[in-house]
Image: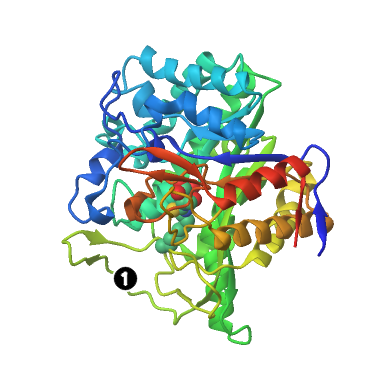
Amino acid sequence: MTTYTFPEGFLWGSATAAFQIEGAVHEDGRRDSIWDVFCREPGAVANGDDGTVACDHYHRMPDDVALMSELGLQSYRFSTSWARVRPDDDQFNPAGLDFYSRLVDELLGHGITPWVTLYHWDLPAALQSNGGWTNRDTAYRFVEYAEAMHGALGDRVNIWTTLNEPWCSSFLSYAGGEHAPGHADRREGLHAGHHLLLAHGMATARLRELAPSATLGITTNHTVADPLDPSSPTDVDAARRIDGMFNRFFLDPIFRGAYPADVLEDLAGLGLEDAIQPGDMEIIATPIDVLGVNYYHGEAVTGTPSSDYAPVVGPDGRLRGNPNIGSEWVRSVSRGLPVTDQDWEIQPEGLTRLLVRLHEEYTGPAGIPLYVTENGAAMPDVADEEGFVDDQDRVAFVRDHLVAVHDAISHGADVRGYFVWSFMDNFEWAWGYDKRFGIVRVDYETQHRTPKASALFFRDAASENCVRG
Ligand code: NCW
C-alpha cells in the first residue's frame, strides 16, 4: 500500500452548478433560462425531467452548507444563475443577488472558501431570443452581469471563474443540439465559441480593474484523444482534430492569442472568421491567474475523412447535429476499458498526461497553477433502506484520479487542488435525474441527503491530505 501525500495547502473541494441543484425556478423574480425552455421541448431531456425542483437547494442552502462542513470540504465551487440575477436583461434582481450573498456568508461562517463560477450554461432566455451566444452583444451583457456579481460578492469572494466548459455551451449546444438551446448549426457553434471566449476575456479585464488582487480564471473541459491505431495516419489525424476542437480551440486563444493554425484549416469555409473582429484575440488573451481543468474521460478515435455533413432528425423529431464541427466523421471507439454509468471510459492516466501537458504547453511557462475543478463519475448507485450508498466504484474512481493528479505533480505539473463533481446528485442536463454524480445521495421524493461511502472517503482524504492505494 502506497500513501500519496499532496503538497501542503492542496485544496480539497466539491462543485455544483446553479441550474442542476437550485430549483425554485419561478421564485423571487427568477425567469426562464435557456435550460428551462429546453426542458419543455419533447425529447430534449430524458424522462421529460426539468429543473423546477432539482435538489431544492434554493430553500435548503443552509443545511447543505452545514453538510459540506461536516464532510470537511475546504472549498465549494458553485455557479450563480444569470437568470436569477438579471431575469429580463434589464434591471438586476435584488432577491437573486441576495441568495448568493447569503450563500457566501454561510460558507465563510463554516470556514469554507467560496469559488464562484459566473456561467455554467443557464443563459437567460431573454438573451437567447436575440441569438444568445451567436450574438456578439451577449458577451457585453456578460460583462455587465460579472460586474454586478462582483458588486454583490466581491467583498467576500476572491476566486472567480468566468465560464465553465465553453466547449459544451458552444459546440454541444449550438452545433450538437444536445444541450440548450438545442441548435444544430455549425456556424452558430463556432460563433458561440468565439463570443464565449470574448466574454471571458472582457469580463476578466473588467474584474481585474475592479479587484486587482482577486484570483481570476476559466474552466475548460478536456478529452485525451488517442488514435485507435497509432500507425494509421487517418486515426492520428482524427486524434489531432478532436484535440484541436476540444482542447486547443479554447486554450490557444487564451494563452497564445490565436486560434491554432491547423484548426483554422480544418474549419475553413465554416464561418468562424466572420465572428472575429480586430482586437478580439488580444482581449481573449487577457492574463488569467488560474486554469480550471475538468476531466472525465479519455477516448480512442478513428474515422474516414469526408466532407459530407447533414444534421439528422431524431426519432423524437428533434434536429441533432454533431459537436465535432468540421470533423463530423470522427468517431470514438470503445477500447474495452471499464465505463461509468454514462459509458464514459475510465482512464485515470489520461488525467496525468493532460495535466502535465497543460503545465508544459500552456500554464507552466506563464507561472499559472492548475486546479482540477471537476472530476467524478455517474455510477449505478443502489441505496439501502437507510438511503446509504456503498459506492465503492465511485470511491475507486476518485481515488485513482487523485493518484493520477499526484503523478502529474510528481512529473512537475503545478496542480493546487481537486474538486469532486459533484457534492450531491443533481439534474444531469440532457440525462435528467437518471445519472447520479453526487458523493451525497439525494432522495428526490423526500429531498433527504445521505452521504455515500465516497463522501466519507473524500472527507478522510481531505483531512489527511493524502490517499492510499
Ligand atoms: S455533461 C458534462 N459534465 C457533467 C455536468 O454535470 C457538469 O455540469 C459539467 O460541468 C459533469 O461535469 C460536466 N460535461 C460534458 C462532457 C463532455 C461530453 C461529451 C459528449 C460528446 C457528445
Residue 452 vertical position relative to residue 302 in the rendered view, above or below: above
Residue 258 in sight: no
Residue 153 vertical position relative to residue 457 in the rendered view, above or below: above
Q: Nearer the viewer, residue 23 or 430?
A: 23
Quadrant occupied by the C terminus: bottom right
Quadrant occupied by the N terminus: bottom right
Q: Nearer the viewer, residue 178 or 134?
A: 178
Where does label 1 land, which residue?
309
- Left or right: 440 as drawn, with respect to 308: right
Residue sitting at x 44%, y 46%:
425
Relative image position of residue 364 (x, y in whole percent): 78, 48
- Left or right: 67 as drawn, with respect to 122: right
Q: How many marks?
A: 1
Q: Nearer the viewer, residue 245 or 125?
A: 125
Label 1: few (<14), some (14–19) or many (≥20) C-alpha neighbours in 10 Å = few
Residue 278 vertical position relative to residue 81 in the rendered view, above or below: below
Q: Which residue reaches farthest bottom?
A: 231
Relative image position of residue 75 (x, y in whole percent): 63, 33
Residue sitting at x 83%, y 57%:
410
Q: Quadrant of residue 31?
A: top left
Relative image position of residue 187 (x, y in whole percent): 35, 54
* Disc 1 within 8 angstroms of ligand 1 (CB): no
Relative image position of residue 246 (x, y in whole percent): 53, 58
